[in-house]
């Protein structure tokens, strides 16, 4: 008997979840040393295939470029492993003798992991590492546009994990590109937590599933170049960030904001470095391509080079162009440049004062990107402090490329490819998600000395209790 694709996808999800639950029952008994050996093996095996997986992702999706995807893959293996290597996640984590309290790390259980098409292979390694480090089994749901390369990445990490002692079924992956399979996975009774990285619709579905979920909202981070900044250095950071993997990292800058006296210098220096400031007609032509009539991002422009985007819009730019820039002053649904654009395109806001910059940054983020990322290029700590206390983001980055700083590559943040946006961004966490987000803490608490009640205390309590009961009966 042959099943329809949606039925086959649902059945596959059920089987994988059952296998994952059986594996989870073994994983939760493993020591930290055993789990660490598994993560070491996963990272080593994945890093060996960083190049081939990067090429496979670009070939299948058409997003980004191979060199930067290799960097992402190595970041997801080498850098993440380095950050979690000494981390304690299971067993007794801490003892507090003075409080007569122990804290015990407990795996949350089977994790359903949603994988985006923009980072399909690196996300697999990163999520497998943080899941297995914390003693959890994980089942991946690939984006249909990145099905083959995601399956290849999962096969590599699953084989390495099992060779290092993980039970079969610890790492699974849906192989049928149907939404029904993903829906079945998120609703499966065996699943304890959903770790969702993807578009707004997918994240909303994760939170609507009835399961605990960690999802990430849209990134739409402005970058403020303050008058105290080294303009060339600031633009170098922004150029590196916005052109990295052709703008597919959600933490990358989506706009530049400056005060009016800075405009000419930013344009002059930027034009020399590879920024192309579009005229009104060019910006209008490109704007028509960025989003579809229903308001969603046009997948045809995602991860394409600046020169390709210009050609698609019907105009030409110098061959050395890395980023396209459009003058903008407003934020809202009818202003495509004020929204997240997963390609090397920036809005350029020019404001009359520092106060106006602050208001504009908040306006942009309130429209889209609340809780995600903001970048600032500045040497005046007082101004940095002022903005840090008011900008509604979880990652406030100073003097660093936002795409790389946000994921923890050039900052002290935990290296992660799932970036929580906090309650303001509709997320359950504001963290760069780590293994510590995938455990529960069991607290073992001893009774402490209690004060002895005196007869007078007892009489007072009895009197108050009697009065309360009388009032309740009177009602």
Image: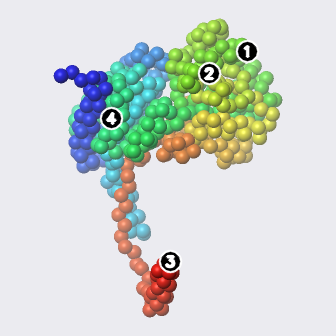
Foreground mark, 4 or 2, reads 4
Q: Is residue 437 visible?
A: yes
The answer for how far apart the CA atoms under marks 4 and 3 are is 51 Å
Residue behind mark 2:
345
* Residue count near mark 2 (Cα–Cα under 10 Å), binned few <14, some 14–19, many ≥20: many
SS class of the residue under badge 4?
A: helix
Earlier in the chain: of badge 4 and badge 3, it is: 4
Foreground mark, 4 or 3, reads 3
Is residue 94 shown above or below 17? below
* Residue count near mark 4 (Cα–Cα under 10 Å), binned few <14, some 14–19, many ≥20: many
Residue behind mark 3:
475
Contact? badges 4 and 1 (CB < 8 Å): no
The answer for how far apart the CA atoms under marks 4 and 2 are is 37 Å
Earlier in the chain: of badge 3 and badge 2, it is: 2
Contact? badges 4 and 3 (CB < 8 Å): no
Q: Please tell me the numbered disc located at residue 279.
A: 1
Q: Is residue 165 left or right of residue 44?
A: left
Earlier in the chain: of badge 2 and badge 1, it is: 1
The answer for how far apart the CA atoms under marks 2 and 1 are is 14 Å
SS class of the residue under badge 2?
A: strand
Q: Nearer the viewer, residue 403 or 471?
A: 471
Residue at image position (62%, 43%) is: 392
Foreground mark, 1 or 3, reads 3
Q: Is residue 128 visible?
A: no
Earlier in the chain: of badge 4 and badge 1, it is: 4
Earlier in the chain: of badge 1 and badge 3, it is: 1
SS class of the residue under badge 1?
A: loop
């Amino acid at each position: 008997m042959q099943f329809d694709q949606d039925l086959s996808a649902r059945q596959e999800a059920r089987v994988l979840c059952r296998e994952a639950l059986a594996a989870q029952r073994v994983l939760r008994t493993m020591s930290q040393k055993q789990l660490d050996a598994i993560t070491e093996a996963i990272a080593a095996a994945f890093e060996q295939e960083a190049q081939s997986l990067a090429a496979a992702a670009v070939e299948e999706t058409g997003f980004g470029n191979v060199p930067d995807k290799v960097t992402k893959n190595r970041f997801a293996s080498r850098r993440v492993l380095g950050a979690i290597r000494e981390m304690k996640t299971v067993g007794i984590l801490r003892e507090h003798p003075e409080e007569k309290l122990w804290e015990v790390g407990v795996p949350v259980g089977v994790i359903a992991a949603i994988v985006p098409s923009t980072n399909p292979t690196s996300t697999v390694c990163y999520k497998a590492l943080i899941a297995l480090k914390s003693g959890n089994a994980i089942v991946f749901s690939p984006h249909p546009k990145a099905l083959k390369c995601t399956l290849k990445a999962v096969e590599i990490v699953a084989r390495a994990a099992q060779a290092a002692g993980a039970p079969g079924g610890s790492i699974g992956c849906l192989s049928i590109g149907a939404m029904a399979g993903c829906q079945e996975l998120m609703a499966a009774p065996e699943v304890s937590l959903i770790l969702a990285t993807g578009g707004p619709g997918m994240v909303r579905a994760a939170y609507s599933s009835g399961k605990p979920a960690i999802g990430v909202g849209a990134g739409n981070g402005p970058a403020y170049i303050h008058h105290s900044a080294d303009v060339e250095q600031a633009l170098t950071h922004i150029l590196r960030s916005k052109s990295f993997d052709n703008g597919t990292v959600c933490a990358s800058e989506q706009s530049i904001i400056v005060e009016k006296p800075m405009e000419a210098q930013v344009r002059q220096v930027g034009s020399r470095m590879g920024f192309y400031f579009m005229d009104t007609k060019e910006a209008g032509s490109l704007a028509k391509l960025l989003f579809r009539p229903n308001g969603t991002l046009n997948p045809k422009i995602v991860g394409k080079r600046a020169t390709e985007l210009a050609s698609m819009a019907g105009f030409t730019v110098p061959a050395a162009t890395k980023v396209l820039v459009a003058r903008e002053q407003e934020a809202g649904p009818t202003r495509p440049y004020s929204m997240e654009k997963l390609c090397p395109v920036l809005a350029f806001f020019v404001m009359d004062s520092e106060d106006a910059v602050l208001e504009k940054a908040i306006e942009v983020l309130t429209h889209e990107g609340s809780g995600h990322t903001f970048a600032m290029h500045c040497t005046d700590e007082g101004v940095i402090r002022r903005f840090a206390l008011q900008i509604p983001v979880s990652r406030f980055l100073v003097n660093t490329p936002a795409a790389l700083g946000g994921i923890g590559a050039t900052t002290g943040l935990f290296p992660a490819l799932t970036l929580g946006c906090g309650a303001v961004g509709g997320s359950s966490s504001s963290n760069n998600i780590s293994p510590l987000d995938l455990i529960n803490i069991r607290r073992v608490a001893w009774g402490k000395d209690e004060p002895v009640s005196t007869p007078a205390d007892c009489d007072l309590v009895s009197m108050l209790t009697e009065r309360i009961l009388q009032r309740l009966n009177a009602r």
